[in-house]
């Protein structure tokens, strides 16, 4: 099963995946970083939904997971 990542709200950007073993390119990744092409609106709920996650060691079954975040709030200006 191939890992699929869905992002809500949908926004264009690129993903960077870090290898689990440094210097060795395998299908095992330890992290993913998303670089949006434009900023999210302030205080927006962002949901990252992944399908096809699997444990590194044998015996793991593919599963799904969602993570929820909020974008930064508008800074308060002080005079």
Image (cartoon, helix red, strand yellow):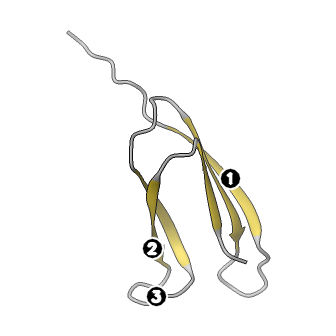
Q: Nearer the viewer, residue 4 or 43?
A: 4
Q: Residue at x 44, y 54 (%)?
A: 13
Mark nearer the N terminus (3 vs 1): 3
Instruction: Give the SS element for disc 1.
Output: strand
- Disc 3/disc 1 C-alpha distance (Å): 26 Å
Category of crowding for the residue at label 1, using alpha-carbon neighbours closer than 10 angstroms: few (below 14), some (14–19), many (at least 20): few
Category of crowding for the residue at label 3, using alpha-carbon neighbours closer than 10 angstroms: few (below 14), some (14–19), many (at least 20): few
Name of the residue lying farthest toward the top: 79
Report which residue position mark 1 lands on: 66
Label 3–label 1 contact, CB within 8 A: no
Instruction: Give the SS element for disc 2.
Output: strand
Question: Image check: 59 left or right of 3?
Answer: right
Q: Residue at x 53, y 76 (%)?
A: 29
Q: Looking at the picture, how far across and down is residue 30, in whole percent? A: 52, 73
Question: Image check: 76 left or right of 66?
Answer: left
In the image, residue 60 sits, relative to residue 25, either above or below, namely above
Q: Looking at the picture, how far across and down is residue 55, in whole percent? A: 69, 77
Mark nearer the N terminus (1 vs 2): 2
- Disc 3/disc 2 C-alpha distance (Å): 9 Å
- Disc 1/disc 2 C-alpha distance (Å): 19 Å
Report which residue position mark 2 lands on: 18
Q: Residue at x 27, y 16 (%)?
A: 77
Question: Image check: 38 left or right of 43?
Answer: left
Quadrant where the image shows the C terminus: top left
Instruction: Give the SS element for disc 3.
Output: loop
Q: Residue at x 49, y 65 (%)?
A: 32
Report which residue position mark 3 lands on: 25
Category of crowding for the residue at label 2, using alpha-carbon neighbours closer than 10 angstroms: few (below 14), some (14–19), many (at least 20): some
Label 3–label 2 contact, CB within 8 A: no
Name of the residue lying farthest toward the front: 12
């Amino acid at each position: 099963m191939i890992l699929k990542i869905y992002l809500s709200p949908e926004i264009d950007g690129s993903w960077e995946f870090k290898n689990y073993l440094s210097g060795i390119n395998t299908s095992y990744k330890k992290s993913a970083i998303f670089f949006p092409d434009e900023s999210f609106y302030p205080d927006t709920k962002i949901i990252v939904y992944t399908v096809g996650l699997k444990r590194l060691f044998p015996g793991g079954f593919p599963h799904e997971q969602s993570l929820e975040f909020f974008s930064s709030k508008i800074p308060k200006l002080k005079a």
